[in-house]
Image: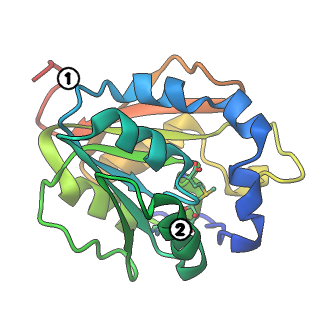
Amino acid sequence: MSDREVMQWDAGKAHVLDAPEREREMPAATVLELLSLEGSETVVDYGAGTGRLALAIAERVAPQGRVIAVEDSSDMFELLSERLADVACAEPMLIEGDDVPLPNRTANRILAVDVLHHIRPATLAEMRRLLAPDALLLMIDWERGHSREDGPPDGVLLTPSQAIRELAAAGLEAQLVESPFAHRYVLLARAEKCGWEQA
Ligand SMILES: C[S@@+](CC[C@H](N)C(=O)[O-])C[C@H]1O[C@@H](n2cnc3c(N)ncnc32)[C@H](O)[C@@H]1O
């Protein structure tokens, strides 16, 4: 069990998530490429924020797939619901604690962008529960050493090795892949025992 410091998300910073420089630093199209979507997947965007990425995913997987945009903050959920209101194949979902009201192995993809430093190991266990056997978890988070005014401080950030260890403890086998983003690392994970061969 990790006793690291976890940063509480401040919904007052929601505007930062949709700032133009964020799309420049981490284009939604590039995140979608990393998800390797075919178009019929059920994607869980865990900690979806204002829904920038959930919206792009919905556009990619409609009409056969769907995106479930999970939030534990009621303020963020309000913004998310507004953004996804008329979007086919997108479902905003407000959760309590780490209980996502979906059956085991629902997700073909789980996306968690800039979320790891906000969550505890129990949340990773919930992601593991949701992940289908041949499914992929994409986790993107800040590297240490690039703290900015609007970004998280180094003290709450995990190194890729620490992240891989936490994921392993939750039953997720993660690999560090080459990051297309400046100052962020990228992990791809599968449920343990499934191996890395493509389904
Ligand atoms: C830095 S924002 C990133 C939002 C979005 N992933 C993006 O990249 O635009 C982190 C989000 O995760 C949400 N969050 C934090 N802990 C969570 C948890 N345990 N369950 C669900 N959402 C959580 C916060 O409310 C916040 O909206």
* Residue 26 drawn above or below residue 98: above
Instruction: Name the residue that disc number 2 marks.
Output: 82
Q: Is residue 31 left or right of residue 89?
A: right
Within 10 Å of disc 2 (Cα), the crowding (few <14, some 14-19, many 20+) is some
Q: Nearer the viewer, residue 85 or 162?
A: 85
Q: Nearer the viewer, residue 87 or 75?
A: 87
Q: Nearer the viewer, residue 1 or 71?
A: 71
Q: Amino acid at mark 1?
A: Trp
Quarter of the render that holds ligand 1: bottom right
Q: What colour scheme governs how the chains and residues are painted in the rendered image of this protein?
A: rainbow
Q: Residue furthest right?
A: 149
In contact (CB < 8 Å): disc 1 and disc 2 = no
Q: Is residue 66 left or right of residue 187?
A: left
* Residue 179 drawn above or below residue 49: above
Q: Residue at x 18, y 68 (%)?
A: 102
Q: Tell me how far mark 1 sits from mark 2, CA to CA.
A: 38 Å
Mark found first going from the N terminus, 1 or 2? 2
On the question of residue 184 being in view, the answer is: yes
The location of residue 94, given as percent across then percent down, is 40, 76
Q: Nearer the viewer, residue 185 or 66?
A: 66
Q: Which element carries disc 1, helix, strand or loop?
A: loop
Q: Which mark is residue 52?
A: none
Q: Residue at x 66, y 50 (%)?
A: 157
Q: Residue at x 64, y 31 (%)?
A: 26
Within 10 Å of disc 1 (Cα), the crowding (few <14, some 14-19, many 20+) is some
Q: Which mark is residue 196?
A: 1
Q: Which element carries disc 2, helix, strand or loop?
A: helix
On the question of residue 183 being in view, the answer is: no
Q: Residue furthest front?
A: 86
The location of residue 7, given as percent across then percent down, is 66, 67
Q: Is residue 1 left or right of residue 144?
A: left
Q: Residue at x 9, y 23 (%)?
A: 199
